[in-house]
Amino acid sequence: MHLIKVTPLIVICSLALSGCSVFGDVSVDIIPYEIVEKSNPFEVRRYERLVFVSTPMSGGLDSAYGPFRKLFDYISGNNNNTEKIAMTAPVFLDQFEQTTEKMSFVLPANFSLSTTPLPKDTAVTLSELRDFKFAVISFSGFLNQGSISTHRAKLQKWIMGRGFKIIGEPKAAGYNPPFTLPFLRRNEILIPIEKN
């Protein structure tokens, strides 16, 4: 993902977290979903349950290193159980008014909100979505505010043409670390929907 400045520390973290290569292979678990409808590059997906660990991004995408570090610390044991939690893909970025406001990791599928360790860092929060549908567009290349805005507009147009109602703010999702070749990266925009 082109979300964070590439420093030696973040490259090491990316390797440790994702087991990815420059060729785009992802060896961590991808959060499970059911495809309800598909029309490349668009999909409608149903997610049974998503448990998010999140933190604000006050400076948008340019401030991504600090939030990434906070979430990484949480899954590395900075929680009330000192529990290490496996990384999953993707990393989510909440979008409001053309800016990125929040970064989230999704916990493995065996976690629920009631079984998830509490964060020690007060800037890190937990939340849960159940039985939720998203319209999704997938694309390669860099995940930056320009590509997010372009693909969000395409997805919104597709949603309106399919008779769906948008019921929440978009999320951007990135599956790969910064050193993955751009044309092999997997990025997505997800917008929560329901039938009109």
Image (cartoon, rainbow, N blue to C red):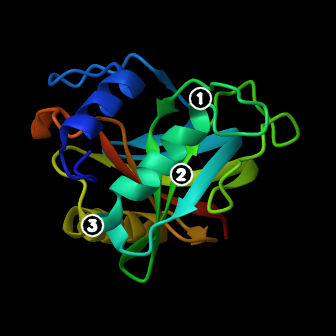
* SS category of the residue bearing label 1: loop
Dot 1 amino acid type? Pro
* SS category of the residue bearing label 2: strand
Whichever of labels 2 and 1 marks the residue nearer the N terminus, that label is: 1
Could you tell me residue 161's position as x and y percent? 44, 68
Q: CA distance from mark 2 to mark 1?
A: 16 Å
Q: Residue at x 45, y 56 (%)?
A: 67
Q: Quadrant of the N terminus?
A: top left
Whichever of labels 3 and 1 marks the residue nearer the N terminus, that label is: 1
* SS category of the residue bearing label 3: helix
Res 133 label? none
- What residue would you read off at disc 1? 32
Dot 3 amino acid type? Asp
Viewer-nearest of labels 2 and 3?
3
Whichever of labels 2 and 3 marks the residue nearer the N terminus, that label is: 3
Neighbours of disc 3 within 10 Å: few (<14), some (14-19), many (20+): some
Q: Residue at x 44, y 75 (%)?
A: 58
Could you tell me residue 125's position as x and y percent? 69, 57
Left or right, 22 with reference to 177: left
- What residue would you read off at disc 3? 62
- What residue would you read off at disc 2? 104
Q: Quadrant of residue 24?
A: top left
Of 138 and 146, nearer the camera is: 146
Could you tell me residue 2's position as x and y percent? 22, 50
Could you tell me residue 94's position as x and y percent? 49, 64
Instruction: Check the image and name the residue furthest to the bottom.
Output: 97
